[in-house]
Amino acid sequence: MNKKLWLVFLYVFVDVLGFSLILPLLPFYAQSFNASESVVGLLLATNAVTQMIGSPIIGRLSDRYGRKPLLLVCLAGTVVGFLLLGWANALWMLFLSRIIDGFLGGNISLAQAYISDVTDGKNRAKGLGLIGASFGLAFIFGPALGGTLSAGGRYELPAFLAAGLSAFNLIAVLIWLPESLPPEQRRLVAAGPRSEFSLRQLWEALHLPCVGPLLSVRLWYGLAFTMFETIFSLYAAKRLALDAQATSYVLTYVGILVVLVQAGGIGQLIKRFSDKQLVFGASILLALSLLAWGLTPNLTVLLIVLAPLALSSGVVNVVSNSALTKSVYPEQVGGALGLSASLSSLARIISPIVAGFLMQKIGPFAPGVLGALIMGGVVWLVWQRILFVPDMSCPAPANI
């Protein structure tokens, strides 16, 4: 692994470590201000709404001005968001912190664009898998540390530590991370007829023969997996009677699984199967895993179910984004990944609200069942529009 990939790996690790400190605790933090389950869903969705607006703009700006300047802006926003979270003495401050972090929350999509700049098509999925490995490694330590620090309801301590980690990341990027986007590519974007982002571009991208189906997969996968991701803490409490610390330890176990999958598993899979085959097979496995998660009767079964869930979700996430970067011209990668992040954010708006409602009105099993049904739709989509298309890697004719 070259120096730039190591730097991005460490950047993402520190960034996600800060995020994973507070992610499992947010529902409990909100409930300490008497927030209902539905309001918790709205809190998580608020961050996603602002990410949906900000991510494609930030991605496109990075195509024009470079990855590093936009990374610095995003990290500054993350620091401010975590500080507000730590200082919160009312529910509205939690919402404000998530809004600020959301608008400037393009850190991961920018890291993905950076990796796309410094890898070729053959090695891109493996390079993007490093981001997943960084996620997993961070989730080994972050939730457990956050759970320990928050003992006794001290939720501000993980937030302040997350702010410190983000500040360190900002300084490290400023000093050590070189720019990855060549000046000639930036000039090409600046001279293009459409260097800004618009909803029309998103609509047009969804109808491009290679880009559109992949973006659709990103959206529907996001809707299904976010059912699991955002509501897991409440699910663990209601169905399995786990407290905040126990839930954090389970997420640490998930982090170990993700590292094993992303650091080694995906690299081996892409040597044997095409992108299309991997997305198709992993979508089937994820549908079955989400159904099993929803119907899990106890902690032991949950730990077993989480293994195929981590494998399948990691493959769908990494390989679909890798295929997306191969389906556009190099000067469009940041914009394409920004659109992907925007659709993922749209899923984060809808899924927490729906999952919270289903859990409150039907039961803790309902989000898993609905997620499985959605992934069943993804399997059909891949079968119809991707699996038998002669060439997935065809650059789009228009700027994204």
Image: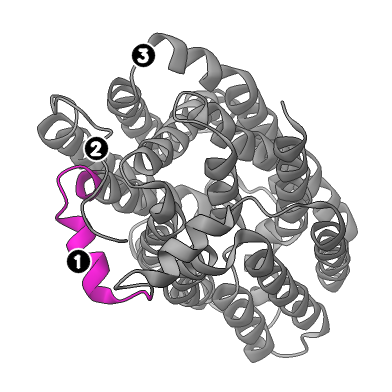
Rate crowding at label 3 as few (under 14), some (14 to 19) or many (20 or more) other CA atoms within 10 Å. Answer: few
Of residues 222 and 109, which is closer to you in this image? 109
Which residue does the image show at 57% across and 81% down from the upper left? 99
* Amino acid on which the number 3 mark rests in the picture: Phe
**Left or right for 26, reference 109:** right
The quadrant in which residue 79 appears is: bottom right
The quadrant in which residue 249 appears is: top right
Where is residue 118? Give x, y as percent: 59, 39
**Mark seen at residue 273:** 3
**Left or right for 101, reference 161:** left
The quadrant in which residue 238 appears is: bottom right
Of residues 82 and 211, which is closer to you in this image? 211
Q: How far apart in space, not on screen, are marks 1 and 3 (Cα)?
A: 31 Å
Which residue does the image show at 78% across and 52% down from the upper left? 177
**SS label for mark 3:** loop
* Amino acid on which the number 1 mark rests in the picture: Trp
Rate crowding at label 1 as few (under 14), some (14 to 19) or many (20 or more) other CA atoms within 10 Å. Answer: few
Of residues 80 and 106, which is closer to you in this image? 106
Image depth: mark 3 or mark 2 in front? 2
Q: Mark 2 points at which residue?
A: 394
* Amino acid on which the number 2 mark rests in the picture: Cys
Where is residue 166? Give x, y as percent: 80, 64
Which residue does the image show at 48% across and 74% down from the upper left? 54
Q: Do the residues labelled 1 and 3 touch (CB within 8 Å)?
A: no
**SS label for mark 2:** loop
**Mark seen at residue 243:** none
Where is residue 84? Give x, y as percent: 76, 83
Rate crowding at label 2 as few (under 14), some (14 to 19) or many (20 or more) other CA atoms within 10 Å. Answer: some
Magenta segment boundaries in residue numbering: 196-213
Point out the tag, 3 or 2, that comes first from the N-terminus: 3
As displayed, is residue 343 above or below residue 239? below
